[in-house]
Image (spheres, grey):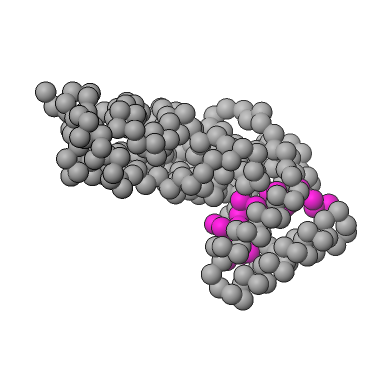
């Protein structure tokens, strides 16, 4: 009788096997081997990443599309300053892997992803628009990449366990195998560092695919600026850029609620243009105080 780890490897190599079913086997093996990090990762992939900060989503669940404006004249790419459009074109795929697989298998080559309703309302107000909608259009290849990456991570994990002499018999593992698993450093590197509830990043798009988003974002003002400052301090390597951005954040915070905020905001946008991937998720939160 082949062991569960060998079965996981075989399924990972079989493109006809649904990855969501593969994940259930991973969770079963991880529970029996008491591998908490693998259990957490499998649970997130199966249930979805709701509540995980955008910056802490696995890299394979982040991407870019094209921000589109839809009105009675049709659909066309949205215009505006480069940083804002790029920031609003980021995609964060939070859906359970079963939903990702279902959408990837559906007809067509693209998918439409809805902006958070509050962000869309502020965007239309800033542009003086009423009868239009904004969506992010993206190729389904982005979804296929998510599925393939999960499959690869599972295969690497199962091969690593086998190299440690952990294979199981049927769906059972010996005491020796459980001890080896406990002593090993084998993990599934999904790059999820932590889960937060109600934190500030996460105010851009909700990756609502072909559905209506009814969620809302309650921002704690202090958290916005504290988190932005921490992100700049830890992720902007260039000293000059880092100091200029930190100064711009201080000016933004000081100007909030006054007529000086728009100018401080424009200055921040100019400085942040080269760091859209890092700072883009903060833009919708900061823009709420414009006007």
Count of picture labels:
0
In the picture provided, is 151 more to the left or to the right than 274? left
Quadrant for the N terminus, please. top left
Using the image as rendered, state which of residue 109 and residue 144 is in the foreground: 144
Residue furthest bottom in the image = 240
Q: Residue at x 79, y 51 (%)?
A: 289
Q: Residue at x 13, y 27 (%)?
A: 2
Q: Residue at x 55, y 46 (%)?
A: 54
In the picture provided, is 252 more to the left or to the right than 33? right
In the rendering, at what x and y percent does residue 39 appear? 39, 33
In the rendering, at what x and y percent does residue 90 appear? 55, 48
In the rendering, at what x and y percent does residue 132 appear? 70, 38
In the rendering, at what x and y percent does residue 165 appear? 17, 40
Residue furthest left in the image = 1
Q: Considering the whole magenta stretch, tell me its main secondary structure.
A: helix
Please check the rendered image and state whether residue 275 is part of the magenta-colored stretch, yes or no.
yes
In the picture provided, is 130 more to the left or to the right than 10? right
Using the image as rendered, state which of residue 233 and residue 112 is in the foreground: 233
Using the image as rendered, state which of residue 212 and residue 248 is in the foreground: 248
Taking 206 as reference, is 223 above or below it?
A: below
Residue furthest right in the image = 259
Q: Residue at x 74, y 51 (%)?
A: 222
Q: Which residues are magenta?
A: 272-291
Q: Write down the quadrant of residue 279 in the picture.
A: bottom right
Residue 91 is at least partly visible in this image: no
Please check the rendered image and state whether residue 37 is part of the magenta-colored stretch, yes or no.
no
Residue 240 is at least partly visible in this image: yes
Taking 270 as reference, is 203 above or below it?
A: above
Q: Write down the quadrant of residue 263 in the picture.
A: bottom right
């Amino acid at each position: 009788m082949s062991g569960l780890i060998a079965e996981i490897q075989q399924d990972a190599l079989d493109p006809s096997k649904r990855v969501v079913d593969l994940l259930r086997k991973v969770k079963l093996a991880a529970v029996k081997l008491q591998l908490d990090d693998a259990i957490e990762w499998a649970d997130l992939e199966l249930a979805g990443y709701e509540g995980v900060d955008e910056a802490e989503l696995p890299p394979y669940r982040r991407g870019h599309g094209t921000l589109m404006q839809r009105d009675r004249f049709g659909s066309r790419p949205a215009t505006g300053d480069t940083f804002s459009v790029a920031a609003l074109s980021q995609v964060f795929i939070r859906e359970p892997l079963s939903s990702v697989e279902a959408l990837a298998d559906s007809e067509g080559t693209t998918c439409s992803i809805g902006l958070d309703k509050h962000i869309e309302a502020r965007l239309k107000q800033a542009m003086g628009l009423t009868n239009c909608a904004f969506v992010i259009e993206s190729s389904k290849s982005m979804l296929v990449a998510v599925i393939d990456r999960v499959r690869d991570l599972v295969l690497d994990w199962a091969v690593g366990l086998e190299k440690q002499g952990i294979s199981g018999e049927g769906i059972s593992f010996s005491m020796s195998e459980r001890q080896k698993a406990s002593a090993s450093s084998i993990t599934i590197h999904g790059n999820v560092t932590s889960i937060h509830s109600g934190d500030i990043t996460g105010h851009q798009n909700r990756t609502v695919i072909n559905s209506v988003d009814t969620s809302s974002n309650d921002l704690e003002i202090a958290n916005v600026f504290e988190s932005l400052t921490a992100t700049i301090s830890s992720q902007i390597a260039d000293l000059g850029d880092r100091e200029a951005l930190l100064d711009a954040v201080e000016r933004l915070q000081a100007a909030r609620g006054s007529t000086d905020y728009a100018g401080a905001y424009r200055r921040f946008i100019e400085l942040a243009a080269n760091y859209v991937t890092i700072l883009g998720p903060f833009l919708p939160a900061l823009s709420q105080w414009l006007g």
